[in-house]
Image (cartoon, rainbow, N blue to C red):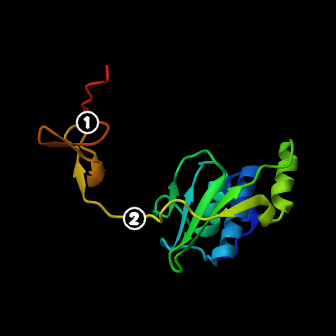
Amino acid sequence: MREKSWESCVEFHGHSCPGLTIGYRAAQYASEILDLEYSTDEDVVCISENDACGVDAIQWMLGCSVGKGNLLFHMTGKQAYSFYNRKTDLSVRLVLKPRPGEMTREEAYDYYHNTSAQDLFDVKDTTLTLPERARLFDSYACTECGETTGANWIRIQEGEKYCIDCYSSYDRFRV
């Protein structure tokens, strides 16, 4: 993994906080366990179970991004991250352990920075299958709004192509 400083991670995120620290430490620990390098393509994949501050650290540290298709969300509300190394076919799921007792924001920040990764995270087997690499789709203009839309999001209605926003869905149970 390309060495990235905590300071540069904070600059990328916009502020320093306990949540960013969780993602920073998870990225470091996953890199250690799976021998990860910064991903310029889709060799490293992260499936995050939350959309909190820590995700920015994972983007910054490991090169995972929504646009490249190697940062995906499986929203469970947990501070849990599954990391995959496509080069080695190895994976790990890191789940944040509960903090020991009540802490102020400052105490939590110090705790996440100074506690060993082994004491911060449970290391588990991944439960989600590694997704396929991102696909490229043909695009079509929506009949109604004219905006170009990827083929897998187009809906056909009376022989015309519509984007999801313009499509009138049919549901006999909706009032």
User: Where's residue 30, x and y in %?
Assistant: 66, 69
The residue depicted at 72 percent of the width and 60 percent of the height is: 122
Decide which of 17, 114 is in the foreground and name it.
114
The amino acid marked with disc number 1 is: Tyr
Decide which of 174, 106 is in the foreground and name it.
174
User: Where's residue 170, x and y in %?
Assistant: 24, 31
User: How many neighbours does mark 1 have within 10 angstroms: few (below 14), some (14-19), or many (20 or more)?
Assistant: some
Name the outermost residue toward the left.
Answer: 159
Q: Which mark is residue 78?
A: none
User: Where's residue 1, x and y in %?
Assistant: 65, 76
In the structure shown, which secondary structural element does the residue marked by tag 2 occupy? loop
In the structure shown, which secondary structural element does the residue marked by tag 1 occupy? loop
With 22 as the anchor, is 173 left or right in this view? left
142 w.r.t. 21: above or below:
above
Which residue in the structure is indicated by mark 2? 134
User: Where's residue 2, x and y in %?
Assistant: 65, 76
The amino acid marked with disc number 2 is: Ala
User: How many neighbours does mark 2 have within 10 angstroms: few (below 14), some (14-19), or many (20 or more)?
Assistant: few
1 w.r.t. 82: above or below:
below
With 61 as the anchor, is 150 left or right in this view? left
Gap between marks 1 and 2 measured at Cα: 25 Å
The residue depicted at 49 percent of the width and 64 percent of the height is: 70
The residue depicted at 22 percent of the width and 48 percent of the height is: 141
Pointers 1 and 2 in contact (C-beta within 8 Å): no
With 116 as the anchor, is 27 left or right in this view? left
Which residue in the structure is indicated by mark 1? 167
Name the outermost residue toward the top.
Answer: 175
Decide which of 19, 125 is in the foreground and name it.
125
68 w.r.t. 158: above or below:
below
- Can residue 11 be seen in this snapshot? no
Upstream in sequence: badge 1 or badge 2: 2
